Image (cartoon, rainbow, N blue to C red):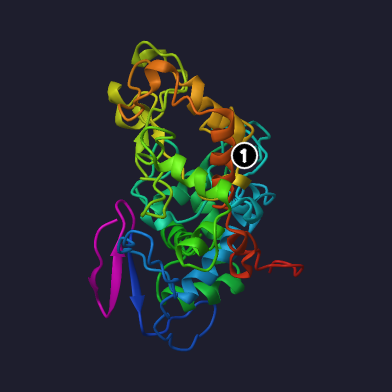
Amino acid sequence: MALSKRVGRGWGLVLPGFVVLRFVVLGFVVSGALAPTALPEPYPLPDLRFFPPLPPSQNPPTREGVALGRHLFYDPILSADSSISCAHCHRQETAFADGGVRFSKGISQREMKRNTQPLFNLGWYSAYFWDGKAPTLEAQVFHPVRDPDEMNLDWKRASERIRKKPFYQKLFHEAFGAVPIDSSSIAMAIAQFEQTLISADSKYDRVLRHQAYFTPDEYQGFLLVNLQNKGDCLHCHTTNPNALGTTGQFSNNGLDKSPTPKDYTDPGRALISGREQDAGLFRIPSFRNVGVTAPYMHDGRFGTLEEVVQFYSTGVNTGSNVDTKMGNAHRGGVQLTPEEQRKVVAFLHTLTDSTFLRQPEFGNPWGQRERP
C-alpha cells in the first residue's frame, strides 16, 4: 500500500491496483440523506513496552473501522453460500487458529493444503500466510474470500451483497465517509479489526511487568529456550527481550530430508519468490499461544508441544536450504534431555494469553441477534 495522500477535501490511501479511498468529513447519500460524518476516532492500542516498536500503519484502525471490520469478520455474507465467515477457520478460543484441526475445510469440504495460522500481533509482520504471498493485511483479506476451496465468492458479488444492506451502509459511512463500498474498503475494514488483535497479557507478560513469577520449571524452561548451547530457540523465536515470540521472517527448520530444492513436496516461500534458495522456507510462527494452537508446523504434522520439542531435540534433518541458524542439525537437533524438554514445554504454556482468548471486543458481535 502506498503512503497516504491528499485527495480532494480528505485524506486517502492508495492501494496498488485499487481505487483511491477518500476519508471525507462531508456526509454523503446512500438510499437517502445521511448526516455529515465526524472524523473517525483512533482506536486505542494497549501499552506494549516489551514489544519492538509497532510499525506505522497506512490503514490505522479507528473505532468505527474496527467495529465494521469485526462485523464483517464474523459474517458469512462473504462466502458463496453464506455458510461460513472468516471466524469459521479463525476461532478466538484457539487464538484465531483452527485449533485441533490439521487442515481446515471451506465450503467445498475439501481440506486446505496447509495448517491454518493464528491471528494476533499482525501489525508487526511484513508479509502474511506461510509463504508470505500477501504483502499487507489488506491484500491478505482478498485470498480466502475468492479461493474456491475457502469462501469461493467473487469480490464483485460480495461488494454488491454488502452494499445492499442498510446496516452496512451506515457502518461504512461512519468508518470511511464518502468511500465506495467495494472490495478495497471491505478489505481495509477487516484489516483494521485484525490489527487490534493484540496478545500481550499471558503469564509471561505479567512476569515481565513484575506482576507474577515463573515456577522453577517455567524459569528453567525460559533459560533453556534462550541458551545457545541448549534449546537455541532465540534466533527465530524471540522472548528475551523482544516479546513478539518470532522474528517474523522465513526459515527452513529441517523438517524434511530434501537433498535438492526440487525435492520439497511443498516448496513454501519459493512458490512466491521463484528462487531455489527459498524452497522449504515458511514464515516463523510466534511462540505466543502455542498451548492452544495445535497441531503445529505448516502441515500440522505434530499434534502436541511435546512432539515439537522432541523434533528439535533429536529429529532435525540436514538438506537443501536448511537455515544456518539450525546449528545442531548435523546431529539431529539440540539434544535436550527428557527433563529439559519438559521444562521447555512448561515455559511455552506461560505464553498462553487467556485474556486474549476471552476478550469480549474480539468476539462475535452478532451474538444471538439475526443478521440484517
Residue furthest bottom as drawn? 35
The residue segment tinted magenta is: 1-18
Q: Is residue 355 left or right of residue 221?
A: right
Residue 179: x and y, percent? 40, 70
Pointer 1: what residue? 294
Q: Residue drawn 65% across and 31% down? A: 110
Q: Nearer the viewer, residue 125 or 273?
A: 125
81 or 347: nearer the viewer:
347
Image spot of residue 169 (x, y percent): 54, 73
Judge by depth and name the residue closer to the eye, 347 or 13: 347
Reply above or below: 330 against 269. above
Q: Is residue 20 magenta?
A: no
Q: Which residue is nearer to you in this view: 271 or 49?
A: 49
Give residue 248's position: percent from left, percent from top.
Answer: 37, 45
Q: Please identify the quadrant where the N terminus is shown.
A: bottom left
Q: Residue furthest front?
A: 216
Label 1 crowding class (10 Å Cα cut-off): few <14, some 14-19, many 20+?
many
Q: Is residue 287 visible?
A: no
